[in-house]
Amino acid sequence: MLQRILGIPVIVGLFFASCEEAYDDFPRTEVRFTCSLQQSPYSFITTPGQFLTVTKKGSAYVVDYPGQPSYTDGKQGVFLGFGGLIIGYPTISMDVSSPYAAYDRACPVEAEDLVISRLTINTVREGKCPKCGTVYDLDTGFPKQGEGKKRLKTYKVYSIKTNTGTNLTVRN
């Protein structure tokens, strides 16, 4: 019995170690993004199962989420990874330090060739690559169908409580 209990952390550790190795061929780019969950449109992701995208457009960035108009912000010093970000509140948390998740918006299949194919997200917690057709589960980042075999590139999300609410910071 003790061997079984001790074996579980080893298996879990190997699972997460193999996920990190999957990013070796993903382009390395800086990620530095902060938002307040009290502000629209970011308050949208305080509900479990909701995700939004943040994409660079010129010197500004654009925030989109299903069924709503785009929001543009001109904040400087924002770095959004290779293809932009998908940020949300999964119904299944893969990180014990924060209930939120952040992924690179670029499809891992296309990113291997340094091609940015940005995933589109829908209301059922899925991201789909318009080029290869792979569908990713946004709760876990893993592919559900299509040719993709690798998990979406994940970034660290820090939930920081302030006297005015909660800020999210996404970093690599």
Image: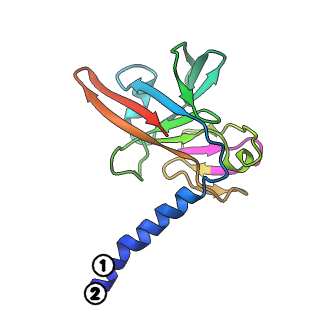
Q: Residue at x 50, y 53 (%)?
A: 140
Q: Nearer the viewer, residue 83 or 37?
A: 83
User: In the drawing, does residue 99 fall left or right of residue 27?
Assistant: left
Please determine whether, in this image, residue 25 is positioned above or below residue 51: below
For the residue carrying disc 1, how many other residues have a C-alpha within 10 Å: few (<14), some (14-19), or many (20+)?
Answer: few
Q: Position of residue 12 (x, y in %)?
A: 42, 68
Marks 2 and 1 in Cβ contact (< 8 Å): yes
Q: Mark 2 falls on what kind of element?
A: loop
Q: Nearer the viewer, residue 45 or 20?
A: 20
What secondary structure do most residues of the magenta stretch adopt?
A: loop
Q: Which mark is residue 5?
A: 1
Query: Which span of residues is magenta-colored?
Result: 125-135
Residue that label 2 marks: 1
Quadrant of the rendering where the N terminus is positioned: bottom left
What residue type is disc 2 on?
A: Met
Q: Position of residue 151 (x, y in %)?
A: 58, 54
Q: Residue at x 58, y 20 (%)?
A: 61
Please determine whether, in this image, residue 9 is positioned above or below residue 83: below
User: In the drawing, does residue 148 fall left or right of residue 161?
Assistant: right
Q: Mark 1 falls on what kind of element?
A: helix
Q: Residue furthest top?
A: 74
Q: Residue at x 53, y 44 (%)?
A: 125
Is residue 122 magenta-colored? no
Q: Nearer the viewer, residue 15 or 94?
A: 15
Please determine whether, in this image, residue 79 is positioned above or below residue 158: above
- Quarter of the image where one finds residue 82: top right
